Image (tube, grey):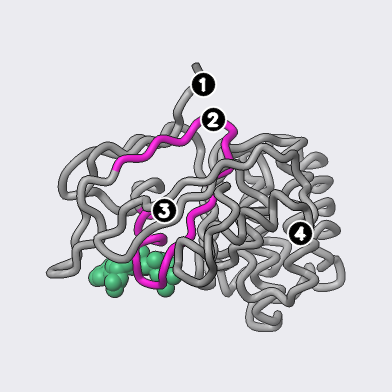
Amino acid sequence: MKAKPLLIKEASVSFGSVEVFRNLSLEISQGEFVAVVGPSGCGKTTLLNLFSGFLKPSLGSVVCSGRVRMVYQHDGLLPWQTAAQNIALGLRDLSSEAERKRQLNEMLRLINLEEFAGHYPHQLSGGMRQRVELARALAGDTDILLLDEPFSSLDYLTGLRLRRELARMLEELPRTVVLVTHDIEEAAQLADRILVLSDRPARICRELRMSLPRPRELTHPQVVETVHAVLAEFGLEQDKVGV
Ligand SMILES: Nc1ncnc2c1ncn2[C@@H]1O[C@H](COP(=O)(O)OP(=O)(O)OP(=O)(O)O)[C@@H](O)[C@H]1O
Ligand SMILES: [Mg+2]
């Protein structure tokens, strides 16, 4: 049986009178790519904060075994460090200077920001900053990636390109990934399993599994059917395909 590096057992979380989770349980296997979709304010970021250890449940338990990197929904870059220095933070554990340099250049090339390596975050656009964040999270040795809407402020085409790049990189460097997204197509293109969360207190109201290898075409029938099924869950389309 595969190891389960991420486990939540009967966890409850409330902020004052706002009950976010009641008795939530979830298991994520090693190397699995799980996408989480759900209404705004239902608890998606809170779920990632539980996994990262930033937040403790008031009841129940959370296990997260492995080195974790998180990409935050809002700017997580250090404003006094350049794009290159921010990415290099993700490479601190590598002892070889030459290897750190090689990987830094590779990441800059990947996010297409070689020319902006020496720029500070305030000199970059929102989409550029997001690309730097993603590069920092992907750089170096990590076991678990927690991604909170990492592509949300990218233009459509850059978003599509980075999805493909992420899929390609995971092929080379397999990791356990939890991706929070409001983009259902993105979830269907990337995830092995999509969790649809309900309104608060959030429960997992539907799970969809995808067996198609990555990268996946947006127009592939299984991707299209999955998008339909998730939209149906939100009452936005009729669920006629029964994925
Ligand atoms: N630190 C906090 N203090 C008080 N309330 C909080 C805190 N963090 C989250 N909440 C509340 O918990 C609920 C879930 O918030 P969360 O940020 O997890 O939602 P989300 O699903 O990520 O939403 P979005 O899609 O808009 O990012 C919201 O009602 C929010 O107001
Ligand atoms: Mg959020």
Q: Nearer the viewer, residue 164 or 169?
A: 164
- Say which quarter of the image contains residue 15: bottom left
Q: CA distance from mark 4 to mark 1?
A: 29 Å
Q: CA distance from mark 3 to mark 2?
A: 16 Å
**Callout 1 secondary element:** loop
Quarter of the rendered structure image containing ligand 2: bottom left
Few, some or many residues within 10 Å of mark 2 (<14, 14–19, 20+): some
Q: In the rendered structure, find residue 218 and report the number of the disc placed on it.
A: 4
Q: Nearer the viewer, residue 171 or 132?
A: 171
Given contact means CB atoms under 8 Å apart, are the residues at marks 2 and 1 in contact? Answer: yes
Q: Which residue is mark 3?
A: 48
Q: Position of residue 136 (x, y in %)?
A: 65, 55
Can the viewer see residue 203 in this picture? Answer: yes
Q: CA distance from mark 4 to mark 2?
A: 26 Å
Q: Earlier in the sequence, mark 3 or mark 4?
A: 3
- Say which quarter of the image contains residue 183: bottom right
Q: Which residues are magenta?
A: 25-49
Q: Which residue is mark 1?
A: 2
Q: CA distance from mark 3 to mark 1?
A: 22 Å
Q: Which residue is mark 2?
A: 30
Q: Amino acid at mark 2?
A: Gln
Q: Amino acid at mark 4?
A: Leu
